[in-house]
Image: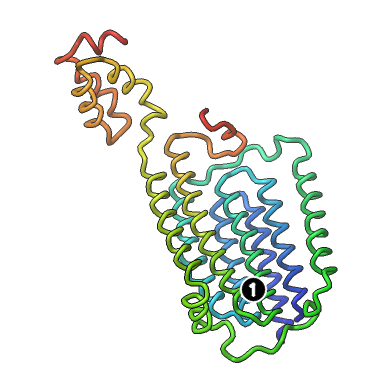
Amino acid sequence: MNISWYIVLSALLFTIGAIGILVRRSPMVILLCLELMLNAGNLALVAFSREVGNAQGQVFALVVMVVAACEVVVGLGLIVAIFRRKLPLDVDDLRSLRG
Amino acid sequence: MEGVIFFIAAIGAVVGAIGVVAARNPFYSVLALIAHLFSLAVLFLLLTSAFVAAAQVVVYAGAVMVLYVFVVAYVGDAAEAKWDPVPGQRLFAGLLAFFLFVEISAAILSSGLKALSTHGPSVPAGFGDPAAIGNLLLEKFLVPFEASSLLLLIAAVGAIVLANRKPREAQSGSIGGRPVSTAGNGSDSGDAATSAGHSAPEARPAGVAASPPPQTSPLGAPK
């Protein structure tokens, strides 16, 4: 398979994640769609790494994975904190910082 | 053969991604994301990056998704009641996403990269296996490696602080805590009483109501 197939697939997955972030309203699902976009970036990184024939892009993908894990941990902590304050889990209602 | 595996994995990845976006229940979204991650790991294997595929399965589908499942089970499936409060939001989102896809694809495919329409150069046998990645991580990219470990530590501590903080100021602090702290000399015992009833937020008014016998006047004044 050509590398361009992987790149176009990565663009498609990135677009689906962007649709999810634009459309969905639950912060948890928005975090999941963010994961989709990060994974699409990972796929592009690994595909370019294969195209160049150099494994450094895979190290980049691993670092992206670490950053995504950190983002998930902090985001889920925020969601748990929002839930324990009995605020609505809806990004349309959570529009002010000091509500 | 490789094309068949690619298309199967690509269809799995796209279906999983659509399932994440379209499922109403967040639990099903998490399950669809796990399927998507497995398909993506197959794609990584096709790109001869074995270690990234293994890390994808073990770290993402194993650890991070378990965290998601726990949080979904804790929060519950908070139903998205209204689907479309902004009129035409889905239409505009679809349009924007379509143009984004066209733009990214056109930008990459017209970039003039020679090797984009090939399968890539032939690589040695150990390309992308744990030994190669480990050599890169511990020799060439040692500083980013340590920085990412520090980032993980900071994120873990931050998540514990965020999720473990008692919601004191939000719900009952303005009712019980504020008048006790402004009550002058009785503030110490008042704080002790509130911290004694701190474990359950419902027990707070009972603790405050039980404390008046030693100090009836400072607590009776704000009420």
| Looking at the image, residue B95 lies above or below residue B213 | below
Label 1 element class: helix
**Image coordinates for residue B108, horizontal then vertical, percent:** 79, 67
**Residue bearing the label numbered 1:** A46
Q: Quadrant of residue B183?
A: top left
- Residue B48 relative to residue B99: left or right: left
User: Which residue does the image show at 20% across and 23% down from the upper left?
Assistant: B188
**Image coordinates for residue B206, horizontal then vertical, percent:** 25, 23
| Looking at the image, residue B179 lies above or below residue A21 | above
| Looking at the image, residue B127 lies above or below residue A15 | below
How has the structure been colored for display?
rainbow
- Residue B213 relative to residue B198: left or right: left
**Image coordinates for residue B151, horizontal then vertical, percent:** 46, 58
**Image coordinates for residue A22, horizontal then vertical, percent:** 69, 46
Quadrant the N terminus of chain B occupies: bottom right
Q: Which chain does the numbered disc 1 sit on?
A: A
- Residue B139 relative to residue B172: left or right: right
User: Which residue does the image show at 74% across and 83% down from the upper left?
Assistant: B119
Q: How many marks?
A: 1
Q: Residue furthest left?
A: B214
User: Which residue does the image show at 58% across and 67% down from the upper left?
Assistant: B37
Quadrant the C terminus of chain B occupies: top left
| Looking at the image, residue B218 lies above or below residue B16 | above
Give the amino acid type for the residue marked by disc 1 in the picture: Val
Q: Quadrant of residue B21?
A: bottom right
How packed mark 1 is, by other alpha carbons closer than 10 Å (few <14, some 14-19, many 20 or more), is many
- Residue B201 relative to residue B88: left or right: left
Relative to the observer, which residue lies in front, A61 or B84? A61
Relative to the observer, which residue lies in front, B84 or B177? B177
